[in-house]
Image (cartoon, grey):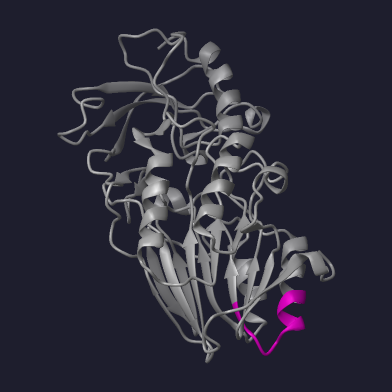
Amino acid sequence: MSSIQEEDLQRIDVTKPDRVNLVQITDCHIFDSADKKLMGLNTRRSFEAVKAAIAGTGEHHDLLLATGDLSQDGSAASYRYLAQQFDDLGIPTFWLPGNHDEPELMPRHFTGDSVHAAKRVLAGAWQVVLLDSSIAGEVHGRVSDTELTFMDNALRQYPDRHALICLHHQAIETGSEWIDMKGLLDAEQLRSRMAQHGNIRAVIWGHVHQESHKSVAGVEWMSTPSSCVQFEPGSRDFATSDESPGYRQITLHADGSLETACPPSPTGASCRGHRVTYRLRSLSSNSDSRIGQLAALSLEPSQNDDIWRNRRFIFCRSRIFSSMSSICASVNDFTSARVWHPSSSVSSSNPWILSLVNPRALARWMKFSRRKCSSL
């Protein structure tokens, strides 16, 4: 956005003039129906537990920031459900899309008395700027030139206000190699543009399903736990953690300082028994040059999870080549892969699917893999 539009801006009256109390919820991964689960966890149930925990604090929150991957399947039904849930909380809510979301659907279906589409919020001595880092059909993100210009203009319009920048993808590395490969493609460019402004005090994001907090050159950089499944911090390959669903509370003070915490796990939303670790070992190479190596995928179960016990799956690990990039996906491009038990047919009508991947891209990959991986 090359200029500031009035509809992009919303002013919030705060209860205490010297502070702004806000809460961040991220990576809810809500489905279109109440019975669907993400890796064995009912995401509606975990979200409602987080919601109850926020309501149960007894504190007044001036605003709520929902920072992407709010839906798992990008369905209108998932957004209508979320809008009702946020309306129930009654906190002015502002959102941005993640890689699982459908940005075109969200303004029509993710709306309500408390849910607003404005991408700038003025509250107390602060300005909150929400950036869209999503790329249609991709897991990784990018802050476009349009979004960078929008940020620049917003910060220059109110140079005396402290700024909180929000986006979905991580702007700095987390230390988890596999998820850092799926962050911002232009993270350095974003940080360079941010450094040109002297009023940015903090940056928050989701995407990584884990808590982190770093202070760099006077700016606080923070990721927030998902309201559903968490990822294992510091992991080289994809692995989930047994940490419970969470959210972040932030108090923004008028002097530009802040206080923040990710509260203890809410009752009723435990992720114990949902820990999965991926370990890859090479098996052989496929003669088709468009398909990379085959690999065995070992899933290490928790003792309480019968789904995973004594299972070994095979999947086709494909390395992208330019001619196949539109239909074929690699482990490095997705957070999970379709997997089969060796005793079942690849063409089985009901294979077990890990559903953390982008659903549209997964559909293309599965269609291709049915033909190319039939030799398994």
Residue drawn 57% across and 79% down? 14
| Closer to us: 114 or 266 | 114
Tell me residue 108's x, y (percent). Answer: 72, 44
Image height of 3 relative to 200, above or below: above
Residue 93 magenta: no
Q: Position of residue 170 (x, y in %)?
A: 51, 60
Identify the residue shown where x is 67% and y is 46%. 106
Q: Is residue 43 left or right of residue 359?
A: left
Can residue 334 be seen here?
A: yes
Image quarter of residue 303: top left
- Classify the position of the N terminus by image quarter: bottom right
Q: Is residue 159 magenta?
A: yes
Can residue 70 be seen at all in this image of the molecule? Answer: no
Residue 329 vertical position relative to residue 216 in the rendered view, above or below:
above
Quarter of the image that includes the C terminus: top left
Q: What range of the chain is rendered magenta?
A: 153-163
Q: Residue at x 54, y 11 (%)?
A: 371
Residue 238 locus on image (x, y percent): 37, 43
Q: Is residue 213 above or below residue 177?
A: below
Q: Nearer the viewer, residue 4 or 342?
A: 4
Q: Is 299 placed above or below 120 here?
A: above
Numbered circles on residues, count? 0
